[in-house]
Image (tube, rainbow, N blue to C red):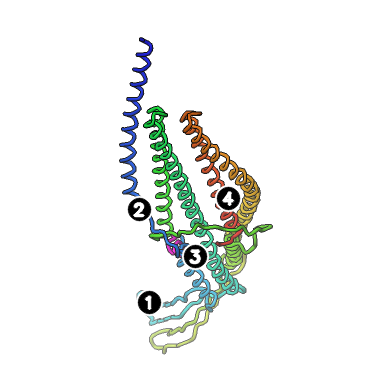
Amino acid sequence: MLAEFIRRSYRLGLRCWLLVIVAVSQFTAGAAVAQEEVSLSRGSLVVSEALAFETVLEAALGNAPAARSEANLRATAEAYDALGNSWVSSRPSLQLSYYDDSPLDDVGLREIESGVSFNLWRPGERDDTATLGDRHQERLEAWQGHLRLMVAGQVRAVLAELAAAESLLDIARQADSEAQRLVTITTDMAEAGASAQSDVLQARTLRLQRQQAVIQARTRLASAEQAYAVLTGLAMRPAARLVEVIEPAVAIPQSHPTLHFLQTQLAIASAKVNLARHQASGRPALSLGVRRERGDRLQPYIDSLAVSVSVPIGKSPATAASVGLARSDEVDAEVTLIETRRQLEQRRAQIDQELALLGESVQLGVEQVAITAQRYEMSIAAFEVGEIDLTQVVIAQQQATQARMDLETLRLRRQRISSEYNQIIGVLP
């Protein structure tokens, strides 16, 4: 009798504690869900069926901070182009000289010289400057392609995160519906006397956990939408998911936008080597002017034309230093180009292997989802006839949900890897 009384008291106390925990959890979860719905309703984006990837990409390009560099690159290209078409290497300078002997012996000597001085091009320097202007123009065009590819990669990443958040939210909602199904089944069985009240509490606790998972999935979706809005500046997102087909490539093509941009950087550095050699050696100068002079007060003024030419001679250590510095920049640009190409090739080979493994994993995941789903339905049927307890049903339901989540994660990973592969070989969607 005493043992039976203690056992019943223990069960009654345990049920009371479970009821308190469930009540508190439901209140907390309900408040969290209400608050979450309010916050998400304020921050969610409009889903548009007509919004295409090209439109999103153009919006992201216009909103990209790196786009501000275009004005500077264009101005640099125009400046070198104008300099290469100029007949002189720098601005002319005015010269004025005045001689007067009145502060000393005051014989009456007066001499005035005035003219204009020009720095002339060294042989080949003008052509090298014009070539540098062409290289800057090529860099501007290559930079536009590089920027487009770089922003396309960012758009691909944020759209992939949106797709992942939506998929996981769908799975979380499906798991929540299944948990609600268990609550309904256990409640009906408890009212019919075929199940204990503890099973109802366990099913309701599982439902609360699933509701919390839905909240977390919606929060992830809200974060993904915020990242999308910051990147593109748009208040709507495309309804269709970005699906890309791999375009196999044996190697990274020479026309890759990033590699092409780095090649123009190398071409500019090479052109600067030749230009540095000219500039460090000095330039010849030409001065044209007039002279007005007289010997003393009794002599008339004599006017004459003045022509002056100065040509630097010999070698200077500054020439070798300037050329060496320019060659260092050329070597750095070449190393950057080689390392970038190697990194792209290495990542492309890794993706090839990863895609092959993902294909096999997806096939296994499909089979696993079918098995766990069938097992879950069988466990519900067995529970309704009293063959197993609710714990086994919960375990089967968790395994089925996890299998669906793992399969969807693999599919999303395969699609993300496909986008990355096309990004690496320089292909836009």
Image coords of residue 244 (percent x, y): 57, 58
Identify the residue at horizontal 38%, vertical 11% (top origin): 3
Quadrant position of the N terminus in the picture: top left
- Identify which amino acid the numbered label 3 is placed on: Glu
Identify the residue at horizontal 49%, vertical 35% (top origin): 380
Q: Earlier in the sequence, mark 2 or mark 3?
A: 2
Task: Identify whether 234 is placed above or below 172.
Answer: below
The image quadrant that residue 106 belongs to is bottom left
Left or right: 28 in relation to 263: left
**Residue highlighted by disc 2:** 43
Query: CB atoms at circles 3 and 1 under 8 Å apart?
Result: no
Q: Earlier in the sequence, mark 2 or mark 1?
A: 2
**Residue highlighted by disc 3:** 54
Magenta region's main secondary structure? helix
Q: Which residues are magenta?
A: 57-64
Image coords of residue 272 (percent x, y): 58, 65
Element type where label 4 sits in the image: helix
